Image (tube, grey):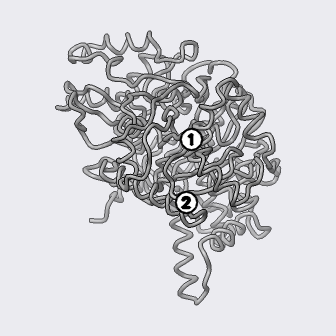
Amino acid sequence: MAGFDTTAAAQAIASARTSLGIEFGSMRIKAVLIDENYNVIAQGDHEWENHLVDGVWTYPLEEVWSGLQDAYANLRADVADKYSLELTRVGAMGFSAMMHGYLAFDKDDNLLVPFRTWRNTMTEEASRRLSALFTYNIPQRYSIAHLYQAVLNQEEHTPRVAFFTTLAGYVHWRLTGRKVLGIGDASGMFPIDPSTHDYNADDLAKFDSLPEIEAMPWKVEDLLPSVLVAGQDAGTLTAEGARLLDPSGTLEAGIPLAAPEGDAGTGMVATDAVRPRTGNVSAGTSIFGMVVLERPLRKAYEQVDPVATPAGDLAGMSHANNFTSDLNAWVGLFGQFARKAGADLSTNELFSLLFNQAISEEADNDGGGLVNYALYSGEPLAGLDEGRPVLARGPRASLSLPNLMRALLFSAFCPVKIGMDVMTKQDGVRIDSLVGHGGIFTTPKVAQSILAAAFDAPITVMSTASEGGPWGMAVLADYLRHTDLPLADYLDDVVFKDAKSTTMRPDPTMVAGFEKFFKHYMRSLPVEQAAIDTIGQQQD
């Protein structure tokens, strides 16, 4: 990716030689504008948070739109501030979001029940039944599991479902009028056949033949969005959509849109990991490890989610529901202490100071006997329907700041290791390269070295590591202009041809320490279950 100057960036904006990616993350909606050289030339964001309402993790749709409009308004302001230009048009755009979940609408396009996000673990029976029916792992967060569980629960709304989709699919539909979904995101709704790049026809028939589904006035194939692979026509921004995105009325209609994708797909693109035997680890509020498969898995594993790359190739995902929430809470606590002590430290300084303690020579290899569960919500990889943050230690454990920080970081990576171990150690999946991305990798060496120890594999971090999903979605939007190349070639030969990266190999001592910690973590899971059984989700 070549460098840029302010004048060149302004010319790119004025002539719409740009691409815009907007991603709905769990804690932030972020908009990223890139130029033809894939440099970020402007950005805007909006912080938001999911709500636990009647036992369901959700985001009100009003907040979807107010948050999107705020993120875009902040992008416009950034363009005006940096370049003294009004943003009226971009060359292409695309929307991505946290995958899975359940947004169901009736024939009049009314939302039938509040948005059920990926974070919910209420579909265990549906997940188990469908996995057996399809001989294909259907995690609890997959959209079809939510629909089927609602049918099993005899929820009043189920006969009236006319369409259901993901968050990215919903936003794209409202902005373009097209009920479509990128194949990566679609693979989290219903099983995909990689040979047809569409929903698996045999599985559609199996689902429709279930007695409780036969009693419904619909067939599931009529409820699902159409599947598109990267580069296919996904529609254009309508006049209504332009006003919805930019209520100021400045943004013009007619902008081509890429197929809406999930955060797994944008993570693969952002790390140049769409070829077989490549993989990536995307770390945010949740964390997932992804490997593009050169062959199907030998069997269905409940710890491995079958998904697709944006080009339609089969991939295996180890998805953990929890990652940064616990780390952020602890850093926030130390930040409060620092302020009370009169130390004026920025957030970045705090993270750097604390995280580096985890890899200091003062830290014991295994975290000194501390065990931590960074679980704010259920963690199916660990067999837990709910979560409670827990820090525990025996009387002989060594409680120190370096050991605490090592235990906090080790524990954050433990759940995702469960599924990755299944793929590599049980199924024999081979990986040539793993790339880490997400904000946690902006602190040099720390997360990279711990992840290398967790997977006992070299970990590469690119210069774009902190850009993550919205940048990946902007790249997918730009790909609309490069469809003469396969997606993998486009990424290798165009986007990442000059990218800088660093690779860290696992330190044998830290590998041994992580394995010891991991065994302690797994053996002590009854401690976490006891916390779930005795500590309420909300304070009474």
Q: Residue at x 66, y 70 (%)?
A: 354
Q: Is 429 displayed left or right of 478 in the figure?
A: right
Circle 1: residue type:
Gly
Circle 2: residue type:
Leu
Mark 1 and 2 residues: CB-CB less than 8 Å, in contact?
Answer: no
Mark 1 / mark 2, whichever is N-terminal: 2
Residue annotated with mark 1: 91
Q: Residue at x 60, y 51 (%)?
A: 13
Percent coordinates x, y for residue 527 in the rendering: 48, 54
Q: Is residue 430 above or below residue 89?
A: above
Disc 1, SS: loop
Percent coordinates x, y for residue 106 in the rendering: 22, 30
Quadrant location of residue 269?
A: top right
Is 174 or 105 nearer to us in this picture? 174
As drawn, the label of residue 85 is 2
Separation of residues labelled 1 and 2 (CA atoms) = 16 Å
In the displayed orientation, state which residue is furthest to the bottom: 342
